[in-house]
Image (cartoon, helix red, strand yellow):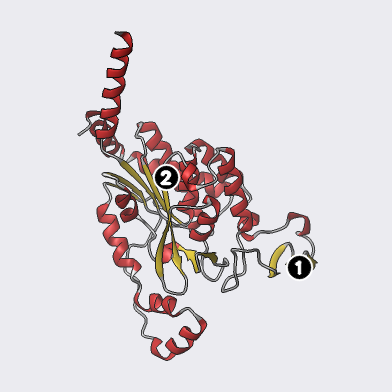
Amino acid sequence: MRKFLLCILLLVATTVLASRPKVGLVLGGGGAKGAAEVGVLKVIERAGIPIDYIAGTSIGSIVGGLYAAGYTATDLDSMFCRQQWLSLLTDRRSDMTYEPYREKDGVTYVFGFPVMGNLDEGHIGGFGMMRGERVEQLIDSMATLKGCRDFKMLRIPFRCVAADFRNAREVVIDDGRLSTAVRASMAIPGIFKPVNRNGAKLVDGGMLNNLPVDVVKDMGADIIIAIDLQQDDQPPRRSNFDFGMLEGMADILGFGGLLNWVATRPDYTKYKRNVRLATVYIRPPLPDMDASSFGNKNSARMIKVGESEAMKHWDELMKIKQQLELGE
């Protein structure tokens, strides 16, 4: 009899869990401003809202990937405030910081920064000086500690957005090694080397979908909490430059799609649509910060800004909590 009652209780609990609305978390791109997303996560945790799906772009893919692997907002706070981001993002060798020039293992270093040399498999030639290897290693080691090196091992379903450099085509990554996917999602054109995946050159997904609300909705989210790091919501100015004269050269060099993106900016239309799709839209005000504002003090400050802004949406979060408890 006792076993029978236990089975009934488990069945009821499973049914309630399955019937409640699913919550999706969207983490936008914005470089160093990603620290503000950690502050918002602190408030979401405080509100007791479970996250069922996560989608992120660029820095949002780092925060989202690690959160999906099992790291808490407090863990991510420590990561942002303790990391030496300049060295991390530029692959700088600390043992060569004071050496104007040095060659080692086929790589040329200037004051510790790798500027020329052989590329590992998966990281290919193209625009951009930095390979982002140290970021990839950090994500890989942190994910491995949680037993979540691969997408299929993640505790929360996660997708990250990258862009096909040649064709300006959005690529949503949901399989393979987490660290490589994150590395592709944050490969800012002209700064980081593209990542080779299935024959495509992948770069920062922010050029096509910097706030992937549609991605998390496609995953099955009924309720969507979006954290937007973009500060300027004005449409990009259209250039008067005649791009037609460069089309032939662009096709030869293999970046015709990118040139078309510069001329038309299709990402803006999707961005505005995604903002409207969000159930709770949170945009931390960071007018004096930009994508390069890394540093321990800046990170700590932005985390507080994110937390403060999220608290302004506390009533909205509580409504979601009630909706989840009622299983409507």
From the viewer's side, name the closer residue of 136 and 190: 136
Residue nearest the observer in this picture, 326 or 175: 175
Q: Is residue 302 visible?
A: no
Residue at image position (39%, 46%) is 54
Q: Position of residue 127 (x, y in %)?
A: 56, 73
Asked whether 90 or 175 is in front, the reply is 175
Mark 1 residue type: Gly
Q: Height in image: 125 above or below 4?
A: below
Q: Secondary structure at mark 2?
A: helix
Q: Label 2 belongs to which residue?
A: 306
Q: Residue at x 39, y 89 (%)?
A: 244
**Farthest-out residue, left:** 328
Label 2 and label 1: CA atoms lie apart by 43 Å
> Residue 106: which numbered mark, if any?
1
Taking depth in this image into account, of 42 and 287 the one nearest to the observer is 42
Q: Residue 111's x, y, as percent?
A: 74, 64
Taking the spot 39% from the left edge, 60% from the top edge, the residue there is 210
